[in-house]
Image: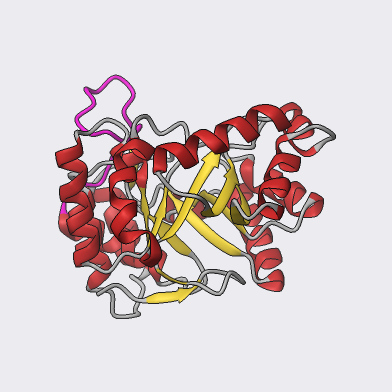
């Protein structure tokens, strides 16, 4: 089984691996159901989806009648205004077939102008706060990608006391001096406030560029079990962050297998450098 840790101040003990339901965006219900069986086999108790993840919310809906009480359920809205965010949240509740979710997140809040709208009067944040007051959501978070997201998360945490953040993190990103400093700054704030930190892109090998895409992920993932073990164990070796799983249901079993065998020891710098060289890994962001 995969170890658990407190998900910030929410009171929930989440598995260190959170299911990233982007993997369900373009699969059949049968494939989704097989994925659920796998997640339950490993004891995963925290699912993270989004309104923009294709058919993911619809695929998860049939599961909720039986498993809702044992799952910490999170979704996201990419809308920036009060009315549109409110409407999207209600659509998500309908698609998921639930009365409420545990966590709603402002999705991909990177662009400074969009940030001003979402955080300002009549913005999406107001809709999420209202939803919390109405009991439709319990907690509110913020997510994002790209190198600039660490700085934007610091702004967001200064504007509102979010319960969680989500951002990219992997070995190569830790070698980006600017990004690593920003990540550490976010982590410091989150530690002080007991805010949950979720990380994505743990298995990123490099961009697809002009190579044929053979996986559902927008980046080319690591594929070999020994490589995935190193990438996953490197993340889990940092005890106060969570790993949101890969966006491909066919790579997912290897990630879960790796996480289930984590013994508490992170790979060495030499092992990670050897992985980078062996798989010709390249940064996704620069």
Position of residue 176 in the picture relative to residue 157 (left or right): left
Q: Is the magenta stretch mostly helix, strand or loop?
A: loop
Q: In this view, does 17 lie above or below 149?
A: below
Q: Is residue 154 above or below residue 144?
A: below
The quadrant where residue 89 appears:
top right
In the rendered image, is residue 247 in sight? no
- Residue 97, how many percent across, how many down? 40, 44
Q: Residue at x 64, y 39 (%)?
A: 148
Q: Give the range drawn in magenta.
A: 207-224
Front residue (pair 285, 96): 96
In the rendered image, is residue 140 in sight? yes
Q: In this view, does 273 lie above or below 176?
A: below
Residue 3 part of the magenta-drawn span: no
- Residue 75, how many percent across, how many down? 49, 46
The quadrant where residue 147 appears:
top right
- Residue 74, how many percent across, how many down? 48, 52
Residue 217 part of the magenta-drawn span: yes
């Amino acid at each position: 089984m995969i170890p658990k840790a407190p998900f910030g101040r929410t009171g929930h003990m989440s598995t260190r691996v959170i299911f990233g339901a982007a993997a369900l965006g373009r699969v059949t219900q049968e494939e989704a159901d097989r994925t659920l069986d796998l997640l339950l086999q490993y004891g995963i108790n925290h699912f993270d989806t989004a309104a923009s993840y294709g058919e993911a919310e619809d695929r998860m809906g049939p599961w909720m009648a039986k498993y809702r009480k044992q799952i910490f359920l999170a979704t996201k809205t990419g809308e920036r205004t009060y009315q549109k965010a409110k409407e999207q949240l209600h659509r998500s509740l309908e698609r998921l077939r639930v009365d409420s979710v545990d966590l709603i997140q402002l999705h991909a809040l990177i662009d400074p102008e969009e940030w001003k709208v979402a955080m300002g009067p009549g913005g999406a944040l107001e809709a999420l706060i209202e939803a919390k007051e109405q009991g439709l959501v319990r907690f509110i978070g913020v997510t994002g990608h790209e190198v600039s997201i660490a700085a934007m998360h610091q702004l967001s945490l200064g504007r509102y006391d979010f319960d969680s953040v989500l951002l990219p993190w992997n070995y190569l990103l830790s070698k980006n001096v600017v990004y690593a400093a920003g990540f550490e700054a976010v982590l410091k704030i989150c530690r002080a406030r007991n805010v949950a930190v979720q990380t994505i892109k743990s298995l990123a090998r490099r961009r697809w560029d002009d190579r044929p895409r053979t996986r559902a992920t927008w980046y080319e993932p690591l594929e070999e079990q020994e490589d995935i073990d190193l990438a996953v164990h490197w993340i889990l070796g940092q005890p106060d962050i969570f790993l949101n799983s890969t966006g491909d249901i066919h790579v997912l079993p290897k990630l879960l297998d790796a996480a289930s065998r984590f013994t508490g020891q992170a790979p060495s710098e030499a092992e990670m450098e050897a992985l980078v060289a062996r798989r010709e890994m390249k940064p996704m962001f620069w």
